[in-house]
Image (cartoon, rainbow, N blue to C red):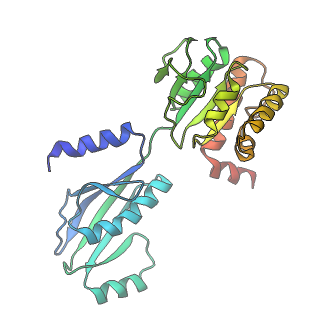
């Protein structure tokens, strides 16, 4: 396998916005088919898409560790004991350490494997109406400051900074844009095409949808969406009125309130800890 294949695999998965983990053998003791430097890339659907740790047995055990690392975002170093069946079963029954894995094989050695998760950068998607919008502009700047990849879906935007991606040929129902599961979407369509945009988002699996609108427009829009068969569960999930209540008045303050709400959704576990 070419050494460049590893870099190509990482680049491809990163470009696709996929979660993945890289498992690397860092040390061995005794007999082991896997040697220091051996690598395996594990994707979020629990597949090894590159490399090897020296065999199916240690790789199948590492997949679970990789999944946990992707879930927590924390790297781990685990010891993989390569033992005959009796020893492996005894080791599994006796060990209480999550960082010790006992695998049935005849090698007889032990590998230390470093498992590092790689998570996609969160994307902030701004759906604009066109023209100058101070809230959209402030969200763009704040989003980049907070390490989001900021994507602007707007046919004729007037922006003071460059988004990470600008899509001008966007359809009203957003059907020609590929959303990701972890996306945070803010709808700033000002009534121009709220209905098709929200209807399109109801079919996308994203983490957050918020819409900047008056209470009257929200009520009217949602009634129309119900008539179109949009699920009530989606409507209940839409953050509108959008943003945390911080008595925001100016466009920048409104943008800050929106980003504060998005941050609370970005780290829900921490938000719950502070409430308790």
What residue sits 18% from the left and 71% below the top?
32
- Check the image and report above or below for 151 versus 250: below
**Residue 246 in the image, given as x and y percentages of width and height:** 78, 30
- Check the image and report above or below for 112 versus 173: below
What residue sits 70% from the left and 28% below the top?
195
**Residue 230 in the image, given as x and y percentages of width and height:** 71, 40
| Quadrant housing residue 95 | bottom left
Q: Is residue 245 visible?
A: no
**Residue 11 in the image, given as x and y percentages of width and height:** 31, 39
Q: Residue furthest front?
A: 228
Q: Is residue 119 visible?
A: yes
Looking at the rendering, in which quadrant would you find the C terminus? bottom right
Please state if 11 lies on the left or on the right of 247 as rendered.
left
- Check the image and report above or below for 98 versus 201: below
Residue sitting nearer the eye, 152 or 113: 152
Please state if 139 lies on the left or on the right of 15 as rendered.
right
Please state if 122 lies on the left or on the right of 131 as rendered.
left
Q: How many marks?
A: 0
What residue sits 63% from the left and 52% below the top?
269
| Quadrant housing residue 135 | top right
Residue sitting nearer the eye, 182 or 35: 182
**Residue 262 in the image, given as x and y percentages of width and height:** 64, 37
């Amino acid at each position: 396998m070419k050494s460049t294949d590893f870099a190509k695999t990482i680049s491809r998965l990163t470009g696709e916005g996929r979660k993945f983990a890289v498992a690397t053998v860092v040390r061995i003791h005794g007999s082991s088919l896997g040697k220091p430097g051996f690598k395996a890339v594990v994707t979020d659907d629990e597949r090894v898409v590159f490399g090897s740790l020296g065999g199916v047995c240690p790789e199948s055990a590492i997949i679970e560790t990789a999944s946990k690392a992707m879930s927590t975002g924390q790297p781990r170093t685990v010891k993989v004991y390569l033992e005959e069946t009796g020893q492996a079963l005894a080791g599994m029954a006796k060990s209480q350490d999550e960082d010790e894995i006992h695998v049935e094989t005849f090698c007889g050695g032990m590998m230390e494997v470093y498992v590092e998760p790689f998570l996609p950068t969160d994307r902030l998607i701004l759906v604009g109406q066109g023209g100058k919008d101070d809230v959209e502009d402030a969200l763009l700047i704040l989003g980049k400051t907070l390490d989001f990849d900021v994507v602007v879906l707007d046919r004729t935007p007037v922006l003071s900074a460059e988004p990470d991606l600008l899509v001008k040929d966007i359809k009203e129902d957003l059907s020609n844009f590929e959303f990701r599961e972890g996306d945070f979407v803010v709808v700033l369509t000002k009534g121009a095409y709220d209905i098709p945009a929200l209807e399109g988002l109801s079919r996308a699996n994203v983490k957050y949808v918020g819409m900047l609108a008056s209470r009257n427009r929200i009520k009217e829009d949602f009634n129309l969406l119900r008539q179109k068969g949009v699920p009530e569960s989606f409507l209940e999930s839409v953050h509108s009125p959008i943003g945390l209540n911080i008595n925001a008045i100016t466009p920048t303050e409104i943008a800050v309130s929106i980003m504060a709400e998005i941050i609370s959704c970005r780290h829900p576990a921490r938000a719950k800890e502070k409430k308790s």
